[in-house]
């Protein structure tokens, strides 16, 4: 499996960055690249650093890391909406590569620090990895500051998103009520490139995609200005998953700040972000579900749904111990991993008990290896080693088909979406090397 996973990353290697997959995703995605860097570190820590460095080269002046850096060599028809669709979104980086105007969950500081830990475990490249962290610290700090200020002007500790794509969980039932409230205006005819590569049953519906494209046009019309979008964007939500990831990323940023000998003022600011983030997640606790829920700012309503995002407090760590125990009970229950019909006891992206569950449709039911990795990593940090080991073992068993699918049908174990998915191969490499890394200084 190690050899096969490494081959997938080599196949998708574009020099200094990695495409998400050979066909469906020919560009560089923000949080994909962070996970990919973790896998690459087990092969070449210098190449792993280059992965994150290449993404940060396209960071916007306000600190935002765009969710896509477009590959100029990809055929225009290979992905929609492509660079030509985003061309009128101004305010991007002053370089020839075009980017989208959205962002994604901030896994990057976690990945950057992981590169150092892996280098230490391998006994080579640790010095270069530390130099890399010193180099990228200011950009990572600017990225987190953007999320903590421009994407949270209320100071709630929760990240605001303007589009479901910014959550990384595009068509999840967690966004259905907010998305259905979006009134779609006139949009030009378009052709979806994704349906040429993947069965339509595995992708968002045409109705969902119309809303996605309409929101893109709204965001472009606003010049991707966060202040304007707070006033005008019909989709405005607090994302608990991105917020939890930001808490953990801020913990990683604190360690990086010490290595970079950052000003104490920076570290005080980051500590405040961590505390505020955990507080914000506590505010979104839903006792009836035993999960955390997103919030629709436009409608002033909780977006309660049994999805994998509800485990946000597990990812953030800390917080209310009683809530953490409740989350673990839900995780183990028939609502998620305890469902006896599952091929493997792995968490579906949406609970089979949730209205809107669809076992083959993207984030409406399939199991995502990358989310299994995030939960495994979080359980390790909570000291839940037995659960973590079980999750890792079954996740690797799921990947024995050698396809490294984007996501998997929860009841049959069939690989779905795009095959040879880079971040799936990357997390497999990290799982396979776990014992070695765990014993590092």
Image (cartoon, rainbow, N blue to C red):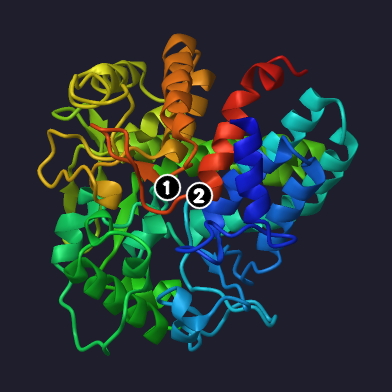
Gap in Å between the C-alphas at discs 2 and 1? 5 Å
Q: Residue at x 18, y 24 (%)?
A: 341
Give the vertical position of 440 relative to 234 (above or below).
Answer: above
Q: Position of residue 7 (x, y in %)?
A: 65, 44
Extreme residue in the top direction: 386
From the viewer's perspective, is 279 left or right of 92?
left
Sooner in the amino-acid sequence: mark 2 or mark 1: 1
Q: Quadrant of the N terminus?
A: top right
Q: Residue at x 83, y 39 (%)?
A: 130
Extreme residue in the left direction: 355
Q: Residue at x 49, y 63 (%)?
A: 23
Q: Position of residue 195 (x, y in %)?
A: 31, 67
Whether residue 272 can be seen here: no
Q: Position of residue 331 (x, y in %)?
A: 29, 22
Dot 1 crowding, Cα within 10 Å, few <14, some 14–19, many 20+ = many
Kindly identify which residue carries mark 1: 406
Which label is found at residue 203?
none
Give the vertical position of 362 relative to 111 (above or below).
Answer: below
Q: Secondary structure at mark 1?
A: loop
Q: Quadrant of residue 250?
A: top right
Q: Residue at x 73, y 29 (%)?
A: 117
Dot 2 crowding, Cα within 10 Å, few <14, some 14–19, many 20+ = many
Kindly identify which residue carries mark 2: 421
| Front-lying residue, 43 or 173 | 43
Whether residue 24 can be seen here: yes
From the viewer's perspective, is 279 left or right of 171?
right
Q: Quadrant of the C terminus?
A: top right
Q: Secondary structure at mark 2?
A: loop
| Front-lying residue, 371 or 156 | 371
| Front-lying residue, 58 or 316 | 58
Q: Position of residue 166 (x, y in %)?
A: 40, 60
- Asked whether disc 2 touches disc 1, contact meaning CB atoms under 8 Å apart, the reply is yes
């Amino acid at each position: 499996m190690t050899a096969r996973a490494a081959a997938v990353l080599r196949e998708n290697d574009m020099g200094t960055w990695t495409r998400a997959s050979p066909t469906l995703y020919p560009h560089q995605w923000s949080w994909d690249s962070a996970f990919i860097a973790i896998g690459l570190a087990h092969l070449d820590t210098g190449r792993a650093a280059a992965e994150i460095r290449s993404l940060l080269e396209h960071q916007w002046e306000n600190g935002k890391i765009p969710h896509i850096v477009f590959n100029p060599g990809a055929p225009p028809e290979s992905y929609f909406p492509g660079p030509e669709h985003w061309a009128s979104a101004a305010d991007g980086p002053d370089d020839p590569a075009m980017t989208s105007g959205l962002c994604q969950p901030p896994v990057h500081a976690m990945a950057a620090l992981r590169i150092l830990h892996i280098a230490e475990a391998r006994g080579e490249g640790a010095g270069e990895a530390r130099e890399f962290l010193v180099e990228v610290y200011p950009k990572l700090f600017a990225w987190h500051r953007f999320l903590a200020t421009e994407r949270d002007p209320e100071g709630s500790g929760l990240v605001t998103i303007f589009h479901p794509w910014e959550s990384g969980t595009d068509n999840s039932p967690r966004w259905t009520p907010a998305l259905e409230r979006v009134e779609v205006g006139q949009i030009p005819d378009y052709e979806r490139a994704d349906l040429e590569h993947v069965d339509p049953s595995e992708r968002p519906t045409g109705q969902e995609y119309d809303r996605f494209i309409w929101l893109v046009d709204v965001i472009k019309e606003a010049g991707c200005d966060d202040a304007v979008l707070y006033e005008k964007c019909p989709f405005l939500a607090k994302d608990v998953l991105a917020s939890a990831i930001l808490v953990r990323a801020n913990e990683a940023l604190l360690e990086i700040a010490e290595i970079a000998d950052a000003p104490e003022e920076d570290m005080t600011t980051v500590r405040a972000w961590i505390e505020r983030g955990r507080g914000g997640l506590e505010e979104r606790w839903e006792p009836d579900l035993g999960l955390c829920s997103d919030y629709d700012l436009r409608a002033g309503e909780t977006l309660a749904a049994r999805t994998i995002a509800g485990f946000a407090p597990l990812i953030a760590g800390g917080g209310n111990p009683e809530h953490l125990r409740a989350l673990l009970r839900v995780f183990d229950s028939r609502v998620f991993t305890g469902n006896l019909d599952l091929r493997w006891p792995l968490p579906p992206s949406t609970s089979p008990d949730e209205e809107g569950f669809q076992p083959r449709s993207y984030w409406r039911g399939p199991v995502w290896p990358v989310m299994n990795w995030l939960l495994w990593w979080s359980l390790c940090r909570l000291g839940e080693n037995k659960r973590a080991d079980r999750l890792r073992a079954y996740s690797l068993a799921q990947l024995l088909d050698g396809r490294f699918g984007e996501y998997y049908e929860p009841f049959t174990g069939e690989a779905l979406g795009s095959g040879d998915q880079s971040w799936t191969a990357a997390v497999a490499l990290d799982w396979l090397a776990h014992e070695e890394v765990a014993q590092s200084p």
